[in-house]
Image: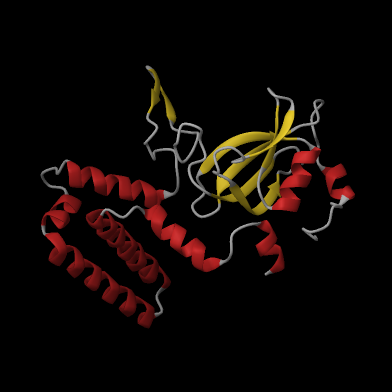
Amino acid sequence: MNSDSSIVNEKMLETLQFDDQGLLPAVIQDWRNGTVLMLGFMNQDAVVHTLQTGHVHFWSRKRKKLWEKGEVSGNFLQVKRLFVDCDYDTLLVKAEPVGPTCHTGSRSCFFSEILDDGILSEPESEAANGTILDGLYEMVLKRKQNPQAGSYVASLLKGGDDRVLKKITEEAGEVLLAVKNHNKEEIVYEVADLLFHTIVTLGHCGIPVTEILQELGRRFGQSGLKSNLES
């Protein structure tokens, strides 16, 4: 695929199953940790512009016009990879968000949880976002803010730098021994322990997991579809 060309593979476009309004739903996902950022709709022009520019474009059903996410706010979505589902009628766009995706200023549009007694809207909540690592980080913050008697994490945090760092050293040593033993189950167990205590350390220092993933993303490769295609 040539991102500089004005011609996008016509056969590919014909394969996509647009609805009777000429639209496809497009789920936007943070490529670094899997957070579902938003849902939009693309027509054929939006797909073409997304592929050519490396920035996510949508078709506005309300305004009846093509628009680039971030054209007003500057919070663009830089495309890393595009997927289509098995029926060819829904797109999955793995993207790197530049700033918050939601117009409310939240990282994701999905922050309202449906509960038995209604809808709980928490714009700062990470409950619907990311991976189990993000969930563990949130748990560590809760133990830090509201220590509970008998909580292992709370006891680690209470011990300060020395207690937290001692556990990191111990768990790293256990990983080394497991690898030397060439025992898969032991390696998995000990690496999980090391990751867990690393999350505790991040919570102790007040550094979200997302910042680590951003740094890994920066090292992994340049932003955007065009850069990926040319690498």
Tell me the residue at 23%/73% (across/down).
169
Is the N terminus in the top left, top right, bottom left or bottom right quadrant? bottom right
- Provide residue 14's location: percent of width, then percent of height: 87, 43
Tell me the residue at 68%/53% (across/down).
54
Q: Quadrant of residue 57?
A: top right
Query: Is 190 left, or right, of 184 in this rendering?
Result: left
Can residue 148 be seen here? The reply is yes
How many circles with numbers are drawn on the protein?
Answer: 0
- Provide residue 161's location: percent of width, then percent of height: 16, 64
Query: Is 230 left, or right, of 127 in this rendering?
Result: right
Determine the residue located farthest toward the front in the rendered image.
Answer: 72
Is the C terminus in the top left, top right, bottom left or bottom right quadrant? bottom right
State how the image is colored.
secondary structure
Q: Quadrant of residue 111?
A: top left
Query: Is 113 left, or right, of 3 in this rendering?
Result: left
- 80, above or below 119, in the image: below
In the image shown, does 138 or 205 lie closer to the viewer?
205
In the image shown, does 84 or 106 lie closer to the viewer?
106
In the image shown, does 112 or 230 lie closer to the viewer?
230
Tell me the residue at 66%/63% (across/down).
228
Determine the residue located farthest toward the top in the rendered image.
Answer: 117
Tell me the residue at 69%/33% (across/down).
41
- Provide residue 184's location: percent of width, then percent of height: 42, 71
Q: Quadrant of residue 207?
A: bottom left
